Image: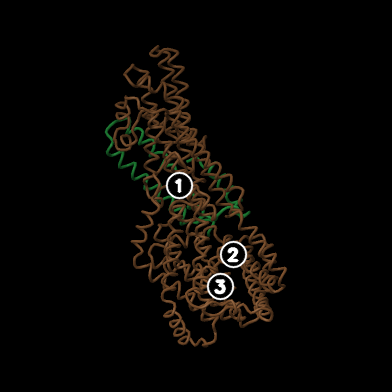
Amino acid sequence: MALKATIEKLESYRKRLKQKKAEPISRKKAERIVAKLDAKHDALKSELKAAKKPSKQERLKAKLKVVEELQERAAWLVKQIGKQAD
Amino acid sequence: MKKLLLPVILCVLLFGFWISRDFQEIAAGVAIFLFGMLMLEDGFKQFSGGVLERVLDKTTDTIAKSLGFGFVAATLMQSSSLVSVIAISFLSADLIKLIAGVGIMFGADIGTTTGAWLVAGFGLKVKISAYAMPMLAISIVLIFQRSKYIRGLGFILAGLGFLFLGIHHMKEGFDAFKDQFDLTQFAMTGAAGLIVYTLIGAVATVVMQSSHATMVLVITAMAAGQVSYENAIALVIGANIGTTITAIIAALPASYQGRRLALAHVIFKVVTAVVCLLLINQLVTAVDWISNSLGIGAEDYALKLAVFHTMFNVIGVSIMVPPIHQLIRFLERAIPAPEIDVTKPLYLSRAVESFPATMEVAMRKEVEHLQDNAIALIAHGLNLSRQEIYATNDVAATVERSTQPMDVNIDEEYERRVKTLYSAIVDFASRAGALNLPRDVTDHIYELRDAAQSSVHAVKAVKHMRGNATQFTRTPQGRISEIYNELRTEIARILVEIHKIGQAEPELRSTLWLEEERVQIERDRKNTSKVIDSMIRNKEIAPEAATSFMTDSGYAYEAMGDLIDAAQAYYAETDEAMAEIERILALEEDEIEGLLAEVSETDDAR
């Protein structure tokens, strides 16, 4: 999981938050995004299960990889927000 | 007629000023009162960045609720006109149903009568100018603050201060007038009096565009003994008819729904006025009885008039609410919905420009309209049926089967169905930018405009590749047909994914779902490049055809990227914090490259 750009965006958000130019993000809202990504992951898994063509299977696997990457990032963000709250 | 009105009003005013100093005070009182109402409206508009609209949205799903909302809103704002303008604005943005709009307007008609109670019960008995001065002094301090809410509060306070000051001057004017003239000598009794004074009340309200102002004028004039009680009642009936003019004016630039609402208001007031004029004697007795029950003195005609004003509107609501569904059906027949012309903007009317939230909603709907037209045109431009590609389990096979060129002139359709809407969207966004809207609303409107621009670019890109895509796929021509079909399939898959996200419930979907499509587009772009290189090397394709294909594949990937950009902007979270999270998590270009490299390493290892 490459997080360089995500960390930079998080830092930029924190700066804007200090300047009151951004809305505060809560752990609950980040968890809602995680849930949305989980839903997409489940949908792709079901699609993969039903897929018969190898080319379609390959495409779905690649998509799953992207969603998994986003899920990891989202979980990381939830932790970061949690740390900030503590 | 309209051109004559202004000089006539000015002449009447100048003549009045010339013959009487007290008339000047009364006229100035009315002017200050109306100015106060304008400030009150401005103050409430400062709060309309969301709160007002959100409350309105959630509290109008039943007739009882919409009546209640109209009543409370008009009581607080002291203006049924402002509430009806809000209702028309919401109807035009398709945010509420016609029945809810009608309910709000009826409720507002009762709510606004509370103003007469305040004036009759409080304004005439207390020296309200004593309250007006400190209110005005404090308000000006608040108006100069940076926070728009504090500024809004300042405008509301100033509005109330001016209302009080206006009432004070009207009262003073009439009191002095009493010593010089006795207007009661012009009093008319019987049916003629009823009709003449009803007309005067209606005309006065049309001129001042405020029944509230007419009511205050009537109450103060009557308190000063300048108008008889019977004639004052007729004036109140006239004021109620005249007030419909504000809704009519607001409805003129509005959608057909706004015009239906204005017609409902006219029917409500005219029917009630006819009933009240026919039953005037019984109503006067009823007013006496109610006033007596409430402990209002027999000689306190000002408060009795307030009772009558409220009774008039309660009677109207009692008459109109039971057959409200029939009324709605009548309105729908009388002002039929225009046939939907997809080539014209459907939501961006001037009426939605009254409130920030309706502007954003209208813009979102119009961009959706444009997106729908753009996607239809892209599919047809590639000789694909949207229904078929949305329904199929095998997009590639469906695309391969779609060989028949569609009878569509893409250039003409682009001008008609895309460019016209896009121009309206850009124009609307520029107007929104010039208004003093909350920053987040302006940002959202600009983001939506950019989404529209991406959709337009996507159509343009497909326009360029349509010729070759049709030529090489209408009949099988070997490898060139296969690679053009692959391009068409990739675009079709993007359309399917956008359709899926559009079908998902807003609270369940995320624009991050489309990140995988962005990665997929990059993967396909690289694969296509490899395939075409290999085809040229192996002489499977003529160099001319290869050049055309490379140009067209450039257009195709451009279109796919634009479609994803448009969808991500359009379906972005409306909650700012959620949208921020999506932005933080979204993949950057170099990250997409990294992911692609990871996947190909895994594939190679396999």
Residue at 58 percent across and 73 percent down: it is B216
Marks 2/1 in contact by CB < 8 Å: the verdict is no
- Three-letter residue code for mark 3: Met
Image point (44%, 77%), residue name: B280
Q: Which chain is green?
A: A
User: Which residue in the protein does label 3 denote?
Assistant: B215
Corner quadrant of residue A68: top left
Determine which residue is flagged by label 2: B208
Q: How is the image coloured?
A: by chain
Q: Position of residue B418 (x, y in %)?
A: 47, 36
Q: Nearer the viewer, residue B468 or B260?
A: B260
The 10 Å Cα crowd at callout 1, few under 14, some 14 to 19, many 20 or more, is many
Q: Chain of mark 1?
A: B
**Subunit of label 2:** B
Q: Do callouts 1 and 3 point to residues on the same chain?
A: yes
- Foreground tag (2 vs 1): 2
1 or 3: tag closer to the N-terminus: 3
B592, A79: nearer the viewer: B592
The residue under the point 45% across, 76% down is B311
**Mark 3: which secondary structure?**
helix
Amino acid type at mark 2: Met
Inter-mark Cα distance, 2 to 1:
36 Å
Direction from residue B302 to residue B478 in the image, left or right: left
Q: Amino acid at mark 1?
A: Lys
The brown-coloured chain is labelled: B
- Give the mark nearest the N terminus, 2 or 1: 2
**In the rendered image, which residue does mark 1 sit on?**
B365
Q: Residue at x 33, y 16 (%)?
A: B478
Q: Chain of mark 3?
A: B
Instruction: Say which label, 3 or 2, has the lower sequence index.
Output: 2
Residue B30 or residue B281, whichever sits in front: B281
